[in-house]
Image (tube, rainbow, N blue to C red):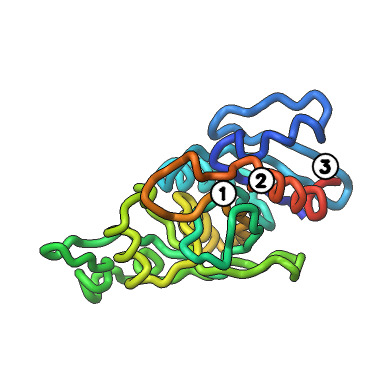
Amino acid sequence: MKQLLIVSTFAEVNFLPDLFRDFNPPVTGKVISLYQDSDTSLDLLISGIGMPSTIFHLTRAQLINQYHRIIQMGLCGSFNPVYAPGQLVWVKEDRFADLGIDDRGLFKTLEEGLPGELGSDPWLSEWISGAAPEDSSVTGVRGITVNTATGSEKRIKQLINQFHPDIETMEGAAALYIGRQLHVSVVQIRTVSNYVTQRDRTSWNISLARKSLFGWFKENLKP
């Protein structure tokens, strides 16, 4: 099975040099091989932060290499107090949460604002399902993907009332969208680094979140 591990920044998988000899941190958009044997291979792609970079680099990598499975790993913010910093989750469904229309202060999705005009591409305005990991112990959650990381009470309330999300990222729905369009399985694995509140990076626990990612990687992807 040909697999691709995709992360937005190398900092999210900075444990990799300890696992693979002669490993050099890759630049954004460059695919490198982590391991390969007769049955399985795993490549790594640093996509860059955000949807545009993710869509471009992941689409190019998939069209060239034709992976059987894509695993997107990274950190996330939690709207749900049940999912505290360090919690490992997989995203059952995700969507673009700020792609739409501002109708005099009321946010509408593209389908709500332009009904019937999306044609054969409804996933820009609907929930996109993610593939489940083989590890059934990982909790499934509902994610949203945004262009601007949420950091104000007004915006938090709006997103919760409209979408009822558990977690937020800036790349998740983009990867699932590519999987839907190119017919490839995409598993989105995240660990919570912070609660989504008024922006305060001093309250984040990135080291704990990375530790959880490391643990899942060792159990599920390390050769």
Pointers 2 and 1 in contact (CB under 8 A)?
yes
Of tags 2 and 3, the one toward the viewer is 2
Residue 65 vs 153, above or below: the answer is: above
Where residue 30 appears, as percent x and y from the top left, is: 59, 32
Q: Residue furthest bottom?
A: 116
Label 3 residue SS: strand
Can residue 147 be seen by looking at this rendering?
no
Q: CA distance from mark 2 to mark 3?
A: 29 Å
Tell me the tag on residue 193.
1
Task: Look at the numbered disc 2 and give the secondary structure of its residue.
Answer: helix
Identify the residue position indicated by label 2 in the image.
Answer: 208
Q: Which quarter shows the N terminus?
A: bottom right
Q: Quadrant of residue 184?
A: bottom right
Measuring from the top left, give residue 179's x and y in whole percent: 54, 60
| Callouts 2 and 3 close, C-beta under 8 Å | no
Q: 10 Å neighbourhood of mark 2: few (<14), some, or many (≥20)?
A: some
**Lower sequence index among marks 2 and 3:** 3
Q: Mark 3 Cα within 10 Å, few/some/many (few <14, many 20+)? A: some
- The residue under label 3 is 36
Cα distance, mark 2 to mark 1? 7 Å
For this orientation, the residue located farthest to the right is 38
Residue at (73, 36) in percent of width and height: 15
